[in-house]
Amino acid sequence: MKAVLSVALGVIAAIGGFVDIGDLVFNAQAGSSVGTPALWAVPVGVLGIMIFAEMSGRIVAVSNKPNFVLVKERYGRNLSTFTLVASLVLTVLTLGAELGGLGFALNYFFDVSVNFFVLVALLAVAAAMYFLPFGGLERVFGYLGLALLVYLAASIKLDPDWGEIGRGFVPESHGAAVYWYFIVGLVAAALMPYEIYFYSSGAVEEGWDERDMKVNRANAFIGFGLGGLISVAILVASAQVLKPAGISAESVGTVALVSEVPYGETGLILAFIGILFAVGGATIDTAFSAAYNLAQHQGWKWGKRFRLLNEPRFTLSLVGFLLLGFAIAQTGVDPISLTEYAVIFSIPVLPLTYLPILLVGNDASVMGKHVNGPVNRVLGWGYFGLICLLAVAAPVLFLWTNGGG
Amino acid sequence: MQPEELARSIGTLESTAAEGALLADDVARDRTKATFARVHARELGETVDHEAEKLNDAEAEPKGGVAPAKVRAIELADRISAELGRIQIAPDSETEGRAAEESLNRLSERAGQLAEGL
């Protein structure tokens, strides 16, 4: 029963951390612009995050070392500092986008001002981070984030062409740069670095050891799989509602409108509940990830499992990152554009994030009997090669297609 | 202003008008929250106004260039913005919603035709 409950917690935790503002927007934009032929990119990205999340969870269970400790140990001072700065810049940009997204989502219901609701969101998120235990954060934001399953129901109710959807999962050669821009973006949105930082640090927070290998696998495969299913559903529903009408998804409101078409007001409310809690969960994940990375790099005591007031440096950095994200959101920058930049320009940082996991996962002297098997090695190196390829292609495609426009 | 830049701008108008029509249809059928309809219509209106400003500021060759199409695009933007304003003002009026939906669908089609003619 305890194992089942742990898996359930992992499933809902993955919803909060996986379907963030970047995933919501990129999936809706891909559906409205390219349509179902872009579907295959989602499982490619989801399988990648599953493999590396499982590996990083296994490393924590064996060695109790989260990802940024591995970065520091494997890279030496200069490269680890560069990786820290790059990851912090991108994570804080993403945090700003998430807070901005929350401000927009709340304003759709109360019509005061986006900036006011960014402040409300900041205070609500900070209160949740302070008062709720780590498991409580996962449960509240994960359970309510499941409202996004309305997109799965919507994509079925809209009566799609199932043959076309099936063909969408088969990669095809394509000459249009915009198509490849969205393929790269969809893969990258699934592999955002903060997800892996949060996952491995979260495993330390939850005190995983070698007895938790099954829970780790279930978290990685079922949890991220469910997140991937929601991503697919958003893309399919957007392809059915927006693409035929020639509508480009440019705002959170457009993403919500997709579920209003089949289900009316109920669909709209469920979509916004899901968006609020999934993006709220992602806000918490990004803020913690930034503070975890800094603390792990600097060798500070860190973690929600201790009382935050007993860890002044970790807690101050957490507050500082939240305020930086808030300042970015308050500039009035469009969170959708911000998240597009964050997704695309996170790709060059991906190899630096994922290489240490692969090296330690393959290292029998650290991992013992839990070292990567042949399948994990092949998939791990295969994905690392893909990530390196994306790191080169992403900025080029972004400039070439004018950001997919 | 180059034809492809103008086409991109008109594409934004076409897409925004189509989205406005979708929203207006939900207003007409009482299938949405009034606050959402108002805020989203305002957002769409701001997008169109911004596009109209960009079009107005862009320089186009008066003869043999895209200047005539640019003027028509600005006129279209103005009309799309006005229709979105109807939803914003009366987001709970089914009559206004129906009227806005029909107009916005027509304007979206016209924008599409204008872009095709470039």
Image: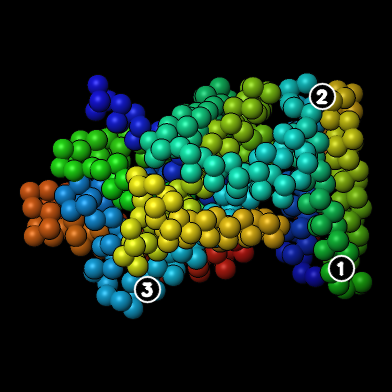
Q: Which residue is mark 2?
A: B28
Q: Nearer the viewer, residue A28 or B61?
A: A28
Q: Of label 2 and label 1, which has the lower sequence position? A: 2
Question: Mark 1, residues whose alpha carbon is within 10 Å: few (<14), some, or many (≥20)?
Answer: few
Q: Where is residue A43 drawn, in percent x and y?
A: 38, 43
Left or right side of A382 for A257: right
To which quarter of the image does residue B73 belong? bottom right
Question: Mark 3, residues whose alpha carbon is within 10 Å: few (<14), some, or many (≥20)?
Answer: some
Q: Nearer the viewer, residue B87 or B38?
A: B38
- Kindly indicate whether the residues beneath marks 1 and 3 are on one polypeptide chain: no
Residue drawn at x 81%, y 57% is B51
Q: Which residue is mark 3?
A: A81
Q: Is residue A281 above or below residue B52?
A: above
Report helix, strand or loop for mark 1: helix
Q: Where is residue A304 drawn, in percent x and y?
A: 38, 47
Task: Name the residue type under label 3.
Answer: Thr
Q: Nearer the viewer, residue A90 or A256?
A: A90
Alpha carbons under labels 2 and 1: distance apart: 36 Å
Task: Name the residue type under label 1.
Answer: Asp
Report helix, strand or loop for mark 3: helix
> Disc number at residue B57?
1
